[in-house]
Amino acid sequence: MAAQVTGFRPSSFLEAQTSRLRELSEGKKALAAISGGVDSTISALLARQALGERVIPVLIDTGFMREDEPEKVRDKLASPPLELKIRIVRSAGRFLKAVADEPLAEEKRKKFREIFYQVLKEEADKFGCEYLVQGTIAPDWIETQGGIKTQHNVLEQVGINPHTRYGFKLLEPLSELYKDQVRSLAKYLAVPNEFSERQPFPGPGLLVRCIGEVKKSKLETLKRATSIVEDRLGAVGSNQYFAAIIENKFADEPSPKTLRKVAADALDLPEEEVRAEAFLDRVTGVKGDERSYGRLASIALRNETREAFGWLHDKLNILQSSVVESFKEITRVAMLVKDRRGEGQYSILIRAVSTRDYMTASVTPISWKTLKDTAEDVLKSSERIGRVYYDITPKPPATIEFE
Amino acid sequence: MTVVPVVYTKGQYNHLIARTLQDLGAESKLLPAGTSVAQLKALKADALVMGGGPQRVRSIADLTPELSSAAQLIKEVELPLLCICVTHQLMATVYGGVTGAAPKPEFGPVKISVAEEDTILRGTGPSFTAWESHNDEVVKVPQGFRVLASSENCSIQAMRHEKQNLFGVQFHPEVSHTTRGTDVFKNFLQSVRK
């Protein structure tokens, strides 16, 4: 897919936004929330260009970032050519406490959002900032306003007044743009590739990849698996690739038998070649422009069949669409790559998608060997992991993240 | 510059429609569903696009407020009009057709078979891959309209009015995964410029 951005001109956008930011901020100070992703980094750089030293950049360490991520981001931003000095606000304990024992995706996201802005309010007060600069882009507010999922960085667009609630006003210079447009802006600003091309990482981070209830050990297991999957899949040319974790508990409905029949029919295989069940913890999808918080189907083929099947993408697509169309409560389908005897407590789900603007996404075709090697490494990383899957659902009917 | 606003009906891809039109050199932005014909005139609109949304169109008497306003606009507007997904169903229903539950809903990639390469589908035949996300569909095309394309699960994927520049598509030409999506908008703009 060629990125076509003829309607968007970085130079005129930059000019318009810097003068808009200057005007809006009325000479006051602004806190800039940075995660290290391209959206928040570019927003902060735009703000610095417009407001100069009046911008105070901070990174909140939520505890849900990847291994050593806050420090890596701080060090890279501080070095040339960007030389953006950020402070890390350590808040992992508060976030973990707020979401403890909460299994529902939207509740987790809303609790995260509340702590996120509480911490930002404290920082803004500390430095006398009357404004907050954040990297909200179009899909963030579209998905939140549409009730698909609550993005952590959307307030005004869903009727929350940041000024009365948190004491600051918002500056969102990128709110009308899509990711590919932000990337072209980053290139225009000569931002190094490791920022401009960095794959998206959600604000709530591993919290929304830890499906269902968050536990410390579950989070630690996911952190290790994430490093392995990112490392192994970095070269496959996917726009976003990551791991998620889910407990090996299964629902009674839809019954494994009916699920198996639909799956076997779709694949043109005898039923005894197929094992099917639905995970108990729910996952987020979008069907007909509506949020669908449903089940994740697990499909496993017999060992030899799995190998011979060769990961034919057309077949896998027929499989996922048959399952999702046949069962209203199923929003996503995952194929087993590898498991081990003596069932661990968790499954790791590998997700890799190809997309221009993250509004629709297709599953990245990954070779069977790469998937198998990745799964073997993941299984080796923790005894708690019993199975490794590949999510074969496009967006729609899935979303890119699981919660 | 051709001015083609987009009516915001709360669909995930409405904003992408405006972006696609901008990329093609038109002036475009989202307008609320309650926008009046007089306001469109004041904006010097040359054409209008309506997007998708999560609502149901089962009868004209039972519509959400924004679809009810959109229905009014469909009746009154005299500009070339392209309606996508739920507003395609709405246009069909407003003109006397029928919308109902799809026997097989479609999500993600779908093969569109082009029956007639008329206006908006010019150069897209014999088939292309489009992305969809719908539980309902047009089950009966209104009088005065004809069907331009279909898919395996849905027989009315695109339609047009016999005499006026009124078009409806069930699929989403505005998402980048629809292979000939940009062509649909290019063709629509072409018919406006004439």
Image (cartoon, grey):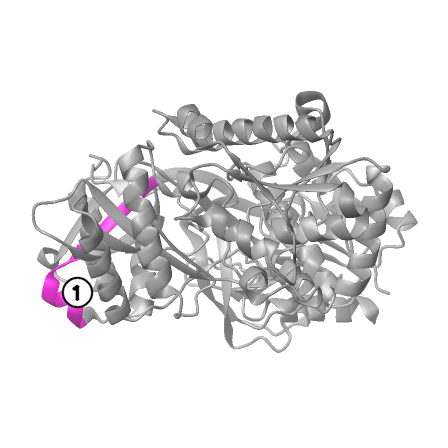
Q: As rendered, which of A75 and B82 lies closer to the eye?
A: A75
Residue A197: quadrant of the picture = bottom right
Q: Position of residue A181 (x, y in %)?
A: 66, 61
Q: Which quadrant, please, contains the C terminus of chain A?
A: top left
Where is A325 relative to A7, above or below?
above
Say whether residue A401 is left or right of residue B67: left
Q: Position of residue B122 (x, y in %)?
A: 64, 75
Residue at image location 42% in from the left, 28% down from the top: A93
Residue A303 colored in magenta in the image: yes
Task: Give the residues drawn in magenta, as a range.
Answer: A295-308
Density class for disc 1 (Cα within 10 Å; few <14, some 14-19, many ≥20) is some
Q: Position of residue B155 (x, y in %)?
A: 48, 59
Q: As rendered, which of B43 and B145 lies closer to the eye?
A: B43
Per the image, the residue denoted by label 1 is: A306
Q: Position of residue B33 (x, y in %)?
A: 73, 40
Residue at image location 36% in from the left, 68% down from the top: A365
Residue at image location 52% in from the left, 77% down from the top: B126
Q: Which quadrant, please, contains the N terminus of chain A?
A: bottom right
Is residue B63 visible to the viewer in this orientation of the structure?
yes
Where is A273 relative to A150, above or below?
below
Residue A52 colored in magenta in the image: no
Q: Amino acid at mark 1?
A: Arg
Is residue A391 visible to the viewer in this orientation of the structure?
no
